[in-house]
């Protein structure tokens, strides 16, 4: 069960935009207000502050993790685009060579051309 929770947590933090998380939290709090409001009124102010501090820290962690995940996705996409471009350059270079040049290059690098 913990793995499932971890998967959903990682998905929510990594892919849901940060501006959407407070909206989701507000809707969830409003939907369950009848359950938690009586308990909230009985809590001392220090406990309320501790709870709010915890969720504030969680929000900051989520924003930072989303920003880091987005940065890594952008970097990966840029690296993939560079690799595709490099592959196309190599393909075009090899296609422009005659068979003898290709055979010589493959032989010099220790490879044999398939026949």
Image (tube, rainbow, N blue to C red):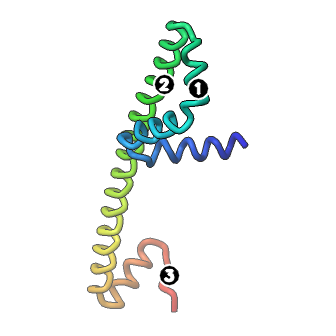
| Mark 3–mark 1 distance (CA, rounded to whole Å) | 72 Å
Near-viewer residue (50 or 113)? 50
- Image position, residue 69 (x, y; %): 42, 44
Q: What kind of element bears circle 1?
A: helix
Q: Residues within 10 Å of mark 1 (few under 14, many from 20)?
A: few
**Image x and y of residue 20, in percent:** 39, 43
Mark closer to the chain start, 2 or 1: 1
> In the image, what residue occupies the spot 49% across and 76% down?
111
Disc 2 crowd rating (10 Å Cα; few below 14, some 14-19, many 20+) is: few
Q: Which mark is residue 64?
A: none
Q: Quadrant of the N terminus?
A: top right
Residue at numbered disc 3:
112
Q: Comparing marks 2 and 1, which lies closer to the viewer?
A: 1
Mark 2 vs mark 3: which is more N-terminal?
2
Q: Position of residue 45 (x, y in %)?
A: 50, 8
Q: Is residue 68 left or right of residue 49?
A: left
Q: What residue lies at 41% left-to-right and 28% top-to-bottom?
A: 60
Q: Is residue 96 left or right of residue 37?
A: left
Secondary structure beneath dot 3 equals loop
Kindly identify which numbered label has been placed on residue 36. 1
Measured along the vertical axis of the image, is residue 15 above or below residue 80?
Answer: above
Residue 15 drawn above or below residue 48 = below
Tell me where residue 101 sits by quadrant.
bottom left
On screen, residue 71 versus residue 114, left or right, reads left
Which residue carries the number 2 mark?
Answer: 55
Residue contact between numbered discs 2 and 1, judged by CB atoms under 8 Å: no
Residue 11 x, y percent position in the rendering = 52, 47
Q: Secondary structure at mark 2?
A: helix
């Amino acid at each position: 069960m913990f793995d499932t929770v971890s998967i959903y947590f990682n998905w929510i933090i990594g892919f849901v935009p940060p501006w959407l998380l407070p909206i989701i939290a507000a809707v969830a709090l409003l939907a369950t207000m009848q359950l938690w409001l009586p308990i909230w009124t009985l809590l001392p102010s220090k406990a309320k502050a501790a709870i709010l501090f915890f969720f504030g820290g969680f929000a900051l962690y989520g924003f930072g993790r989303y920003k880091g995940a987005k940065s890594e996705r952008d970097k990966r996409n840029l690296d993939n685009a560079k690799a595709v471009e490099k592959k196309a350059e190599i393909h075009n270079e090899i296609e422009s060579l005659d068979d003898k040049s290709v055979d010589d290059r493959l032989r010099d690098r220790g490879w044999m051309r398939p026949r």
